[in-house]
Amino acid sequence: MGWFVIMGMLVFEITQSSAWVGVSLAFFFLPNLVFGMLSGVVADWSDRRAMLRRVELAMLIGFFVFSALIAMWGTHLWLILSFSIIYGCVRATGQPARISYAYDVVGGEHIVAGLGLLSVGSRVGQLAGALVGGAAMHRYGTPIALLCMAAAHGIAFSLMSRLRSAGLAETIKQVPIGQNLRECIGEMGANPILLTLVLVTAVVEVFGFSFVTALPELATMRFGVSAEGLGQMHAARAVGGILAGLLLAGMANLHRRGAFYLVVICAFGGSLLLLSVLDQFVLALGALVIVAGLATATDVLSQSMMQLSVPNHLRGRAMGFWVFAIGSAPLGHIEMGALAVMLGADGALLVNGTMLIVVGILATVAVPRLKNL
């Protein structure tokens, strides 16, 4: 989350355009589309704990090097975009392993609660990252803010190194990666529930999660706040994720996840409509708590339903499909940036919020089996 604050503010300061903020976020999320399925295959093929440690170490080194480059060369758009896509590649590699390892630990019966707790942990870190990243950038400059991000990944690497248990539901199928990939593609064709969830997740990613693109413009143009204020907006997102994660963690025996998922999608759209009309910073922070809480719920529910819709040995690959689905994010961020240029940030939020409500209604009518998951 600290990177979202730093990157968003740098790009908006350089270009004064939400369209370029959207492009930078598109660069960050593009690797999910490119490497999503492959990273899921690797998560099923390798020791997930070792994979998580390697990812955190790579991020630590990456932020340290990028901080040094910014200190020596200054801030350049090409440099920011280059690091964004590199960071996105590393992050995309580790996501399926992280989510499927959570299933390894808690098992299928408690997967919604387990992913809810995982979300709480992530959002607590995001809350700290947003506040520290924004404050450090505002007070000490970009290189110091980036070193704070490196330190955070260093702590994560230390914690990941302490993992000992492979988990009760752990499974590793040591067959060639090419064969694993063919099984992955075959499962998509033979599993209509999985295919439906992938498509709905992709559309929600485009129209829902792209609201992040509009935040630097809202922070500077509507509310007149600095990088520290943008950090507070992202911190509000983290608070919403924490609250949603705690709520979902208490739903160990949640039934009819599909129906709940569709309601959450519609509510997500309504929350974007609310954010689009608020003109007071404090009220906007409250709206962002709601927006992010609903966004978190869509993630947790889609991840849990995808893993439960496939055999145990394909769970890593199911999360590869999830990463592939959220690889549609570049389209959403570019679309949001273009709309913000044409209609303003409020108009862009209004359009995307309306589209999310339409998506939720259409999915309810067109795919009735989704309600019964």
Image (cartoon, helix red, strand yellow):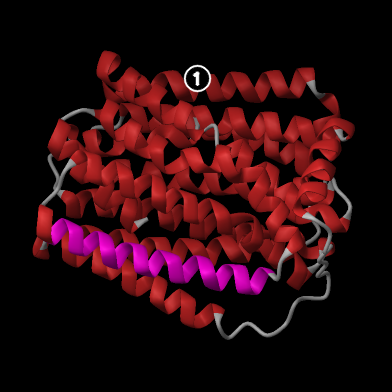
Question: Furthest residue to the top?
Answer: 342
Q: Residue at x 48, y 76 (%)?
A: 157
Residue 287 in the image, given as x and y percentages of width and height = 38, 41
Q: Is residue 244 visible?
A: yes
How many numbered marks, from 0 up? Answer: 1
Nearest to the observer: residue 132 or residue 280: 132
**Residue to which mark 1 is pinned:** 354
Q: Residue at x 86, y 58 (%)?
A: 312
Q: Is residue 145 left or right of residue 4?
A: left
Q: From what the image shows, is residue 281 above or below residue 333?
A: below
Residue 74 in the image, given as x and y percentages of width and height = 11, 52
Residue 124 in the image, given as x and y percentages of width and height = 44, 66
Magenta stretch holds residue 65: yes
Q: Residue at x 44, y 49 (%)?
A: 88
**In which quadrant is the C terminus drawn?**
top right
**In which quadrant is the N terminus drawn?**
bottom left
Q: Residues within 10 Å of mark 1 (few under 14, many from 20)?
A: some
Residue 113 in the image, given as x and y percentages of width and height = 70, 63
Nearest to the observer: residue 205 or residue 29: 29
Q: Is residue 328 left or right of residue 341?
A: right
Q: Main secondary structure of the magenta part?
A: helix
Magenta stretch holds residue 215: no
Q: Is residue 322 left or right of residue 18?
A: right
Q: Secondary structure at mark 1?
A: helix
* Region of the chain picked out in magenta, as a range: 48-71
